[in-house]
Image: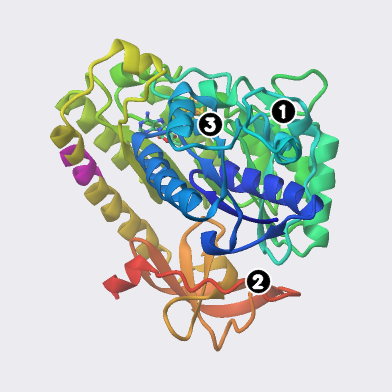
Amino acid sequence: MKAHLVTYGCQMNEYDTHVVESQLVALGVELVKAVEEADFVLVNTCAVRGKPVDKVRAVLGNLRKTKRERGLLVGMMGCLAQLEEGQEIAKKYDVDILLGPGALLDIGAALESNKRFWSMAFKDDIHDFVPPAPQNKLSAHLTIQRGCDHHCTYCIVPETRGPQVSRHPDLILRELDSLVEAGALEVTLLGQNVNSYGKDQTGYPDFGDLLRMVGKSGIPRIKFTTSHPMDFSDNIIEAIAETPNVCKFIHLPVQSGSNKVLKQMGREYTREWYLERIEKMRSLIPRLFISTDIIVGFPNETEDDFLETVSLYDAVQYDSAFMFIYSARPGTPSYKHFADMPKEIKTERLNRLIERQKHWSQLKNSRLIGQEVECLIRGAAYEPSFMEGHTEGNHPVLLPVAQAPVPGIYRALVEHATPHMLFGKVTEVVKQAEFMPMQLHSPVFSSLDL
Ligand code: 5AD
Ligand code: SF4
């Protein structure tokens, strides 16, 4: 059998795709790069906003056509598969295999069953499973906890991924060792709520202590995502400050700058509390890069509430931000209790915030000119004679291929900056890769600013 997997959504989905791919390989299935070559296509889905759901509908529509033309086994996994909405879509598009995020290891049973196989159970085996290290990847993912015990009113994740379950630290360290062995130079620890790691189990380290343990593994760079501000303890901040190989980069979704909106979102903190956490981080970690997630147009958000988000943005001066328009998701409390606002208002606010973010990204990136950054270079850029990678602060960066001919870690002096990209000159080769990772050739949008 030849299988092709399509992945939508977050880094946790990318990790889950790897988990399922490794299971398929163990079963003797060949992985292929295109639908045309495959007799089994499995779509890993995201349900957090309406747009990714629409994409899945379109892909499944096309797959149904192929299925009618030449026969094809079609599967759907991930967050959407867990929801009634997803199951209706699966029925409509004649999906054969449906696996919720807690049932991924049923893939073998699903293929063996030779008939329609749908499983939405939350099973424990997924937490103990240590997938083999991906080959030829310099930057690897490692899921350390699944699910979420917070209940933000807009978020479908508690429905799709269930309550928080932390993985045993020994399994995490074992998986990390295998990544180091396979030549990874950077690991991103993943979780819906990565920094509340350990809280659901007795005898587990908290996230700060886990970072210290992971730091000893010798992997050159450690990142983590996504953190909830409420769970960002002093111990975690101290662990980041003290552990040299933990990147000084924190992604800390704020969602809104208005206390009224934060309350209606069920975020559990106030603007003042969030700003105090940022201050504490900056006082203990001198050169810290910070990014965030923001939702604009949450129900009942007034122009004044929105301006509070803009002013919080100005107060923090984020290095980068992911900004989203509120999407009313069936199954969430905010969908049930609040009326959505007109799309035009949401879009107009989003555009204003994007402009503001561009301003800060340009300013913050320009301030790096003349400073050194550490770059993980992954391969050739779309732009001729450049190699592409990202810094310890997650800035996309381009270095001349003549100075960074091989993927690996380089220190570089920043010479030029756009809001989305740094350009540097190599000052030190820290560690070159022992293998050639896949070439990237992905277009770099911001180079248009040159
Ligand atoms: N509408 C818009 N954005 C959302 N997010 C989560 N749920 C929604 C929604 N219903 C955003 C949040 C979160 C990120 C992963 O997705 O900003 O941090
Ligand atoms: Fe969703 Fe909130 Fe949990 Fe994040 S913390 S996954 S936004 S419920």
Q: In the rendered image, which residue does mark 1 sit on?
A: 166
| In front: label 2 or label 1 | 2
Which label's residue is closer to the chain start, 2 or 1? 1
User: Badge 2, how many Cα within 10 Å: few under 14, some, many 20+?
Assistant: some
> In this rendering, would 12 be left or right of 381?
right
Residue 200, magenta (yes or no): no
Q: Is residue 218 visible?
A: no
Left or right, 3 with reference to 369: right
Residue 158 on image: x %, y %: 53, 22
Q: Secondary structure at mark 1?
A: strand
Q: Check mark 3 vs ligand 2: CB closer than 8 Å? yes or no.
A: no
The residue under label 1 is which amino acid type? Ser
Q: Main secondary structure of the magenta part?
A: helix
Residue beneath the point at 49% across and 46% down = 8
Give the labeled residue for mark 2. 437
Disc 2 is placed on an element classified as: loop
Q: Amino acid at mark 3?
A: Ala
Please give the label number shown on residue 81: 3
The residue at the point 63 percent across, 41 percent down is 190
Element under label 3? helix
Q: Which residues are magenta?
A: 348-353
Asked if residue 349 is among those painted magenta in the image, a careful observer would answer: yes
Q: Please name which of the two marks, 3 or 1, marks the residue nearer to the observer.
A: 3
Mark-to-mark CA distance, 2 and 1? 31 Å
